[in-house]
């Protein structure tokens, strides 16, 4: 993804004028494969009615072959075992595996799944949930929970208890959250009151 | 502990080439009475005597030699060998091993080649423990110890060990995978005589099983419990109770889910510990702000026998002063997960006069290494790991640190050093200052990087190492290297058993020098170097003496490897593709070949072809 946009930037910003059949806002998902120093990068042929992309392909490919080797991470080099890398950089989230949890919403016909590692904190998570299920959450306060809406985001923790989202520090939340449920109606209101 | 840390110059145990040397060992009859009966009786006596004597032979080197004397000695040695070491699980089958050795109490097996650790091989290549577990269950019901390295072990295998071996005492799994906490739960629960459970650098899947609670109630025989690699929460209360009822516990290495507060509680219950892995070494997030902090200094002071300290997985350096009191007695300190600075290291290392083994991150910089050199005069082994393991990262350690270590730590035997910059001068200095070096592994992380002061290749540095370090058995090279470096290795590296090569050399000559020049070479692993079929051919005289050869991303072709396979029937020649590649052209991505008594294995996955 990065390399194809770099190709576009170095050129005449053809992306702005490109004719595509995809929806606005969507980009082509090109998978990056690990590049070995000996094998040349071979992109699989893509069945695509996107004419501009053919030209783009050519440019991106040459971009890949001439890009400095130090940018592409060689598989298995330097020879440090992966558990050492993950531990030393435990604060950097790129190297960590995703935390996928199911999200259910009262009244919705099916569940969704999200990766908690993708979000940096509660505001992003709640925003994402609002977008996903098209509702508004309301304002969080320690005293009263989520005020001003019919919904309350809750989660099941490792002990099996249902907790209100937002009470504990973010890191603790993502490691203890097993699943999310967006409660609606009277049940939701009950949680927020200091009972 | 790698094999190169022991000295071995013996015929291999995994191949019986000299069975044609067998001759009967007959006693000379004295002539009186019936000569036949007489000689049979004397034979029996001799064998009994031999059996009793050979019981005392423990070194596998000596045992291998003894087994070659004659048929009688071979037989008796096979009866009395209680520790069986197999360096390549595919070199011999479980059936053959159990047929030869009748009374084995301890099994030590190694599986995958080392480069598998760096994702160079697709997963599920093999090295399954299962057939061995089943064979052992039939042949050695009194098996007590199993030590596996780079093998695939399943939960069922763990259950087998616990259920079918009533006296099972020790399980050591190094760099293994394929099992999870539910397998551990069954294992610890059924294994009533368990003394040692060491999980080292292994991948344990989180089946959400509370395995710590599964240890049986009552006093335990546990002497060693190492689980620092287990990446899941554990039931601390259960662990505390377990430690409290394990009076013989000497080694305890916790994982990073144990906070420093919890560590305190464990330490005061187990002051007899000699080896401690501290877990996270930071407070848990739930700790209240106003809570009284326990007296960590006291806890460490109580552990008067502590000699080996590790852990510090999520260290808060403010807590480091707690360990000052044990530093004077430490022989081994592992800070390789602790991102600390030179300033944070100095007050600790300055007290570690007896330190022999030190593992650390390069965050301590050259300055930190200078501090090590100033105090640790007894240092035997040093490993410096990179915080940022990428080719183009900043390098906080360099030739300055290496030079300092060479000047301060004259007794150094083993070094692993990751860096971004190096000079020939520093490497040459180390070769002269540290003549006892047995293991020299230098990893200059930027590929093809020259001496950053002179711009020259690193040939002379590595050349000096093989010339001056007369005891060297293990070598890993890096940086810009021409064929000349390999010429040096071939000429002077006469004791080298293990050689690791990456992104080095100019031509086939380099590999030829090594294959023709190093008679003790056992394990050769090469990646991304310009060596082709002609070079491969030059080792034909030597491959039966080697445990394995690994070559990946070199210039080998299928027909070149086929030639080798045809010329050497006792060699298993595996051509391994990356999992998603189609079997198309003649180029060989990965060659892994090894001698074997039993021919090609039957459990190859579809990405492996045996030629």
Image (cartoon, coloured by chain):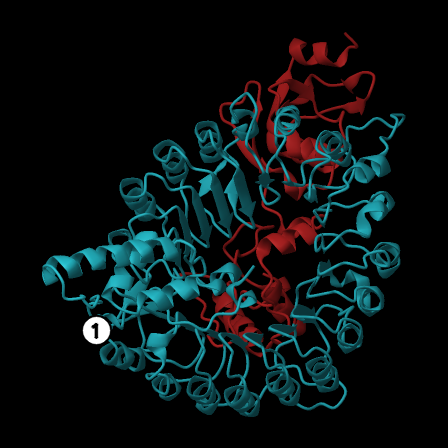
Q: Position of residue B137 (x, y in %)?
A: 31, 40
Give whichever of A113, B600 is nearer the camera. B600
Q: Is residue A45 visible?
A: no
Write the residue at 60% across / 50% down. Answer: A25
Q: Position of residue B159 (x, y in %)?
A: 39, 34
Residue at the outermost top position = A195
Give whichever of B361, A153 is nearer the camera. B361
Write the residue at 69% across / 16% down. Answer: A150
Considering only vertical position in the picture, is A186 above or below B280?
above
- What colour has chain A? red
Residue at the outermost front position = B32
Q: Is residue A42 visible?
A: yes
**Badge 1: few (under 14), some or many (20 or more) residues near its Cα, within 10 Å?**
few
Give whichever of A1, B108 is nearer the camera. B108
- Chain for disc number 1: B
Query: Disc 1 designates what residue?
Result: B20
In the rendered image, which quarter contains the N terminus of chain B? bottom right
Q: Is B325 placed left or right of B558 in the picture? A: right
In the rendered image, which quarter contains the C terminus of chain B? bottom left
Q: Is B209 placed left or right of B276 in the picture? A: left
Give whichever of B512, A1 is nearer the camera. B512
Q: Position of residue A106 (x, y in %)?
A: 57, 18
Residue B219, picture quadrant: top right
- In the picture, one chain is cyan; tell me its letter: B
Label 1: which secondary element: helix
Considering only vertical position in the picture, is A121 above or below A52?
above
Q: Position of residue B127 (x, y in %)?
A: 37, 54
Write the residue at 49% across / 23% down. Answer: A109
Considering only vertical position in the picture, is B331 above or below A108?
below
């Amino acid at each position: 993804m990065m390399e194809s946009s770099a190709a576009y930037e170095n050129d005449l910003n053809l992306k702005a004028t490109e004719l595509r059949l995809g929806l606005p806002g969507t980009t082509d998902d090109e998978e990056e494969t690990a590049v070995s120093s000996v094998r040349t990068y071979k992109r699989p042929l893509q069945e695509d009615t996107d004419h501009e992309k053919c030209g783009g392909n050519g440019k991106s490919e040459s971009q890949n072959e001439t890009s400095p080797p130090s940018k592409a991470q060689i598989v298995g080099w330097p020879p440090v075992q992966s558990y050492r890398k993950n531990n030393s950089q435990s604060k950097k989230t790129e190297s960590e595996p995703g935390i996928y949890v199911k999200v259910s919403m009262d009244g919705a016909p099916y569940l969704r799944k999200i990766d908690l590692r993708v979000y940096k904190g509660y505001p992003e998570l709640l925003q994402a949930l609002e977008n996903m299920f098209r509702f508004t959450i309301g304002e969080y306060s320690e005293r009263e929970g989520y005020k001003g809406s019919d919904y309350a985001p809750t989660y099941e923790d490792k002990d099996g208890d249902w907790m209100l989202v937002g009470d504990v520090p973010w890191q603790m939340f993502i490691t203890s959250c097993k699943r999310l449920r967006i409660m609606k109606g009277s049940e939701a209101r009950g949680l927020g009151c200091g009972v | 502990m790698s094999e190169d840390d022991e000295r071995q110059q013996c015929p291999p145990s995994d191949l019986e080439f000299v069975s044609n040397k067998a001759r009967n060992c007959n006693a000379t009859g004295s002539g009186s009475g019936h000569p036949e009966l007489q000689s049979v009786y004397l034979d029996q006596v001799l064998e009994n005597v031999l059996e009793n004597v050979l019981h005392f032979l423990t070194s596998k080197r000596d045992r291998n030699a003894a087994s070659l004397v004659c048929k009688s000695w071979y037989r008796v040695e096979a009866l009395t060998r209680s520790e069986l070491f197999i360096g390549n699980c595919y070199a011999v089958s479980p059936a053959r091993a159990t047929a030869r050795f009748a009374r084995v109490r301890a099994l030590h097996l190694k599986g995958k080649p080392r480069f598998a650790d760096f994702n160079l091989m697709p997963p599920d290549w093999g090295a399954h423990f299962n057939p061995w577990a089943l064979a052992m269950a039939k042949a050695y019901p009194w098996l007590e110890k199993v030590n596996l390295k780079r093998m695939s072990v399943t939960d069922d295998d763990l259950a087998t060990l616990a259920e079918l071996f009533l006296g099972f005492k020790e399980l050591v799994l190094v760099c293994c995978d394929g099992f999870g906490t539910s397998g551990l739960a069954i294992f610890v629960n059924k294994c009533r005589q368990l003394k040692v459970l060491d999980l080292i650098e292994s991948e344990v899947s989180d089946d959400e099983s509370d395995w710590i609670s599964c240890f049986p109630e009552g006093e335990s025989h546990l002497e060693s419990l190492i689980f620092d690699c287990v990446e899941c929460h554990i039931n601390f209360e259960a662990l505390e109770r377990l430690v409290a009822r394990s009076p013989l516990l000497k080694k305890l290495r916790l994982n990073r889910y144990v906070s420093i507060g919890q560590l305190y509680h464990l330490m005061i219950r187990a002051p007899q510990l000699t080896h401690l892995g501290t877990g996270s070494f930071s407070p848990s997030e739930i700790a209240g702000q106003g809570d009284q902090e326990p007296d960590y200094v006291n806890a460490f002071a109580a552990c008067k026998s502590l000699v080996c300290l590790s852990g510090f997985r999520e260290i808060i350096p403010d807590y480091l002063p707690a360990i000052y009191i044990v530093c004077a007695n430490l022989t081994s300190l592992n800070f390789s997960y602790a991102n600390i600075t030179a300033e944070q290291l100095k007050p600790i290392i300055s007290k570690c006069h007896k330190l022999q083994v030190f593992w650390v991150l390069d965050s301590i910089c050259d300055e930190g290494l200078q501090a090590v050199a100033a105090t640790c005069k007894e240092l035997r082994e040093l490993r410096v790991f990179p915080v940022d393991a990428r080719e183009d990262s900043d390098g906080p350690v360099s030739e300055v640190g290496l030079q300092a270590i060479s000047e301060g730590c004259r007794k150094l035997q083993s070094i692993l050093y990751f860096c971004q910059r190096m000079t020939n001068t520093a490497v040459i200095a180390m070769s002269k200052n540290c003549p006892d070096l047995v293991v020299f592994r230098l990893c200059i992380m930027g590929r093809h990087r020259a001496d950053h002061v002179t711009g020259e290749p690193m040939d002379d540095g590595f050349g000096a190492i093989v010339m001056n370090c007369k005891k060297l058995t293990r070598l890993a090279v890096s940086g810009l290297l021409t064929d000349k470096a390999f010429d040096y290795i071939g000429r002077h590296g006469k004791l080298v058993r293990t050689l690791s090569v990456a992104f080095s050399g100019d031509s086939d000559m380099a590999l030829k020098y090594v294959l023709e020049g190093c008679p003790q070479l056992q394990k050769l692993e090469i990646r991304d170097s310009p060596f082709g079929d002609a070079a491969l051919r030059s080792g034909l005289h030597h491959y039966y003496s080697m445990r394995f050869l690994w070559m990946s991303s070199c210039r080998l072709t299928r027909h070149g490897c086929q030639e080798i396979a045809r010329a050497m029937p006792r060699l298993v020649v595996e051509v391994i593709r990356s999992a998603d590649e189609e079997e198309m052209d003649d180029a060989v991505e990965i060659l892994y070949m090894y001698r074997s008594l039993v021919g090609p294995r039957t459990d190859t996955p579809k990405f492996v072809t045996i030629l």
